[in-house]
Image (cartoon, rainbow, N blue to C red):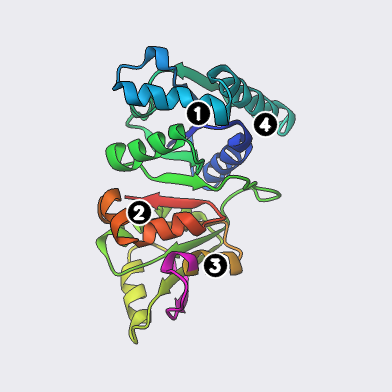
Amino acid sequence: MRILAVLTKGDTVAGTMDAAVMAAASVTCSSIEALNVIVDPAHLVCPPEEIDMQELRTHDEGSLQQRADAIKSAFGEWNIVLRPEAPSIELRTITGPEAQTVLRETTADIALVVLSHNRNMDAADAFHAEIFTAHRPVLLVPPGWKAGARARFSHVAVGLTDSDLARRAIETAGPWLEAAERVSALRVTDESNADRTLNTVMQGSGVTPEVHILPRSDKTIGAQLVREADALKADVLVTGAFSHSEWLEWLMGHETREVLAAADLPLLLVH
């Protein structure tokens, strides 16, 4: 198994790499690779409007070179200063369009992609490419999150529905579920047979989770799942992502967007 960490903003490099290391420590992982794509408008073949949008980023995010230098500097500090006795991880820097470059670098043996949930074009393009085109599981890390004293994902929470998407998420997260010391299965519902449904969904996962049935409240389902995962002190929340297209989810206000909006812990997302 190889893990690819895509770095899109200097001040979130440490959290992204911490999450990648924790994910690798929980399973048999052959390598972690770090990637920074420099999106230079001068090298883009795309509509003029997209080039204009890239150039406008300078006002809010700094110049192209400043953004690249910030990522390189933050990665160097994390890799050398913050973990001096650990094996060094290489940062590859490639100039090109974000989505196409990330897809090209997501080779068949990349089992997990780690991204920070940054509000910039690079992060959004990389996330869309991995979820909707590469169909890779994405470990999405909130800005500002740090691993602290945690070395791996010891406590995994799973947000469940009775759906094929939930079953795919459980299957994909299997290595991390099996390696965890504790697994909590969460479902927001008013159904009377929710316990039985959860047990059915978890069948074949190889783990026996703690079951937590949460009655519906005035909060969104996504917010309830995140709040419960936080209350249980989970290290990561596993959930299916975008059962419909992203456009339909935006229109309908569905659970994935709710979870993304509320999350303050890493999310392992499976499309």
Q: Secondary structure at mark 4?
A: helix
Q: Which is more N-terminal, label 3 or label 1? A: 1
Q: What residue would you read off at disc 1?
A: 33
User: Residue at point 56% right, 39% down?
Assistant: 16
- Bounds of the magenta span? 207-223
Tag 2 or tag 1, which sits nearer the N-term?
A: 1
Residue 195 within the segment the image draws in magenta: no
What residue is disc 2 on? 241
Determine which residue is flagged by label 3.
Answer: 227
Q: CA distance from mark 1 to mark 2?
A: 24 Å
The type of residue carrying mark 2 is Ala
- Would you place residue 148 above or below residue 218 in this image? above
> Which one is in front in this view, the residue at disc 1 or the one at disc 3?
3
Q: Mark 4 and mark 2 in contact? Answer it, CB < 8 Å.
A: no
Q: Which of 136/226 is in front? A: 226
Q: Residue furthest bottom?
A: 192
| Label 1 element class | strand
Q: Nearer the viewer, mark 3 or mark 4?
A: 3
Of the pair 8 and 102, the residue shown nearer to us: 8
Mark 1 and mark 4 in contact? Answer it, CB < 8 Å: no
Observer able to see residue 216? yes
Q: Residues within 10 Å of mark 2 (few under 14, many from 20)?
A: many
Q: Could you say which disc has been placed on residue 76 in the image?
A: none
SS of the residue under disc 3: helix
Residue at the disc numbered 4: 78
Amino acid carrying label 1: it is: Glu
Mark toward the start of the polypeptide (3 vs 2): 3
